[in-house]
Image (cartoon, rainbow, N blue to C red):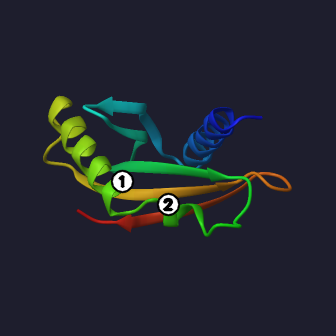
Amino acid sequence: MDKDELGRQGEALAAAFLTERSYRILARNFRVQGAEIDIVAEQSGTIVFVEVKTRRTGRYGSPAQAVGIRKQRKIIFAAHCFLRQNNREDCFCRFDVIEVYAASGWQLRHLPGAFET
């Protein structure tokens, strides 16, 4: 399985994981001006912007460690655009990371509030 397929499978598992926990998926792969949000979901009135990082192993650190400040800024920019486009600027929002490990079966780790604006 190549890197792109691994990422797609990780995102699909993350979306299913969130749905099972009463999140409503609003968008997947929301793109704007070179920025992307993997999953936009809503739970209890909070809009949740989710970055999904899938890795085969933890050999080079945790997947969340790959969400550096530059990536965070792009996600925050895209989140502002999403909120504006959907007239939701007055909503509470949160930025989560879901780590997906593909080695020896799929394992997920949800990190709510992984970073802030």
Which residue position is annotated with label 2?
A: 66
Residue beneath the point at 41% across and 66% down: 114
In the image, residue 40 lies at what x, y percent?
39, 40
Up-down relation of residue 55 to residue 33 (above or below): below
Residue beneath the point at 37% across and 48% down: 49
Mark 2, other Cα within 10 Å: few <14 / some 14–19 / many ≥20 = few
Residue 71 is labelled as 1
Mark 2 and mark 1 residues within 8 Å of each other at the beta carbon: yes
Q: Could you say whether the residue bearing mark 1 is in a helix, strand or loop?
A: helix
In the image, residue 68 lies at what x, y percent?
39, 62
Q: In which image quadrant can residue 12 be found?
A: top right
Residue beneath the point at 36% across and 57% down: 95
Residue 102 is labelled as none
Give the residue type that dot 2 points to. Answer: Ala
Image check: 117 left or right of 9?
A: left
In the image, residue 108 lies at what x, y percent?
66, 57
Q: In which image quadrant can residue 32 be found?
A: top left
Give the residue type that dot 1 points to. Answer: Lys
Q: Which of marks 2 and 1 is nearer the N terminus?
A: 2
